[in-house]
Amino acid sequence: MMVISYDNILKDHPWIVTPSQKCILSPDSDGFLCGLFMTALLNWEVSGFYDGKILLIRDGLNIEQCIFLDMDVNRPNVRSMGHHMVLYNKRIEHPNFTYQNCIQPNLLRNYDGNTDFQKKYPFGTIHLLLGLLQHAGVLSSLPDRAIWPLLFTDGTWNNLFGYTENCLDWIEYLKINNPSHILHYSICSSPHSVYSIMRGLNDFLRERDSFDAKGFFLEGEYRQGGRNKRTGDKLRITDSKGNIINLEKGGNNKYQIYRREKERIIGFINRICDYIQIEYCERQWQWECFDLIGMVKGDFEGSKKRLNNKTFKDLMDQNPFSLAMTSGGSIEYTLFPSS
């Protein structure tokens, strides 16, 4: 089978291993892991967060100056790295489908949702990123305990057993089955029994749960309660209805992450650091002085549309900023305000 060429990716996208870049993270464990490795190893700065509903970006920066990690940005002048299924039909081109500056595993294999949805990439952005960092000579090894956050992130452990054939195919494509690959121990050669993996993951999940939110900040006050279970690994900047939460105005009328939410997430990030033996570099993580860009979020399921050639073309006519197929028949998308 054809396997990944890390050389070609680094040649086409050298910015992924270029020091001192600004980045925007997805606000969950995959994004946090990416941010931890890039800040500690390449002196990157976390300059904002994007959850598909709002974009927080450090005052004075624009999106072209930043690299989006764990999201697929559909703009030729914006650098990004993600892993979602973004193309519906590879036989039909559209001028607004512009992912040439995005490191995207499904596009690397020319996979589309129409014929290849069951073959889509089953891991997190961090797993592809680690292979690139190793190949570039930035990182040579991981501690044994890194297995737990790496199996947890993006439900990797569920996918390994729930979509076994597809995962095995991607393990070979990414060369993880090669003993020299940085993820070989965590995924291919760990001495753990199935039972010990269950126990190790259960311990990590309980640690994650210890950081569950106890409430949220909205309209000038902190509100206890709400649906806060299993939120320990997620920075919450909007709720399920799209309301902005856990943000307040600071100096110069700019936004900052509410203190309790910031402390909760930094606690989880520091716990991850114990596993991966990477230092949380506080000075390189921005939590305040943000501009807020409100997006227009939509999905086909909510609008009762069926994903097909015509509806995908209609969506691309709107020039979405990001999108992700969530099933074989539906897609979530975000429109930039200027779109």
Image (cartoon, rainbow, N blue to C red):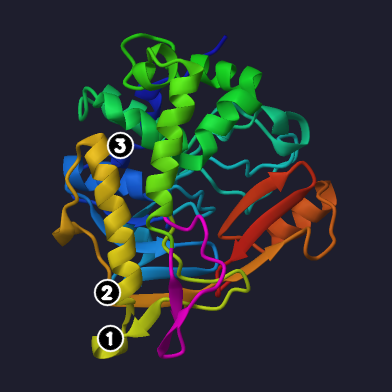
Nearer the camera: disc 3 or disc 2: 2
Q: Which residues are magenta?
A: 213-232
Please say whether residue 217 is one of the residues in the magenta stretch. Answer: yes
Characterize the local packing of mark 1: few (<14), some (14-19) or many (20 or more) Cα atoms within 10 angstroms.
some
Under tag 2, what secondary structure? loop
Q: Earlier in the sequence, mark 1 or mark 3?
A: 3
Residue 11 visible here: no
**Residue in view at x 41 percent, y 88 percent:** 221
Q: Which amino acid lies under the numbered mark 2 shown in the image of this protein?
A: Glu
**Residue in view at x 45 percent, y 47 percent:** 70
Q: Is residue 144 left or right of residue 232?
A: left
Where's residue 267, x and y in %?
28, 57
Which residue was labeled with disc 3? 14
**Residue in view at x 27 percent, y 69 percent:** 287
**Disc 1 from disc 3: Cα separation:** 36 Å
Characterize the local packing of mark 3: few (<14), some (14-19) or many (20 or more) Cα atoms within 10 angstroms.
few
**Residue in view at x 31 percent, y 31 percent:** 146
**Disc 3 from disc 2: Cα separation:** 29 Å
Nearer the camera: disc 1 or disc 3: 1
Q: Is residue 40 left or right of residue 196?
A: left
Which residue was labeled with disc 1? 250
Where's residue 4, x and y in %?
46, 20
Question: Which of the two residues, 200 or 146, is positioned nearer the viewer here?
Answer: 200
Q: Is residue 78 above or below residue 6?
A: below
Q: Quadrant of residue 333?
A: bottom right
Where's residue 121, x and y in %?
57, 32
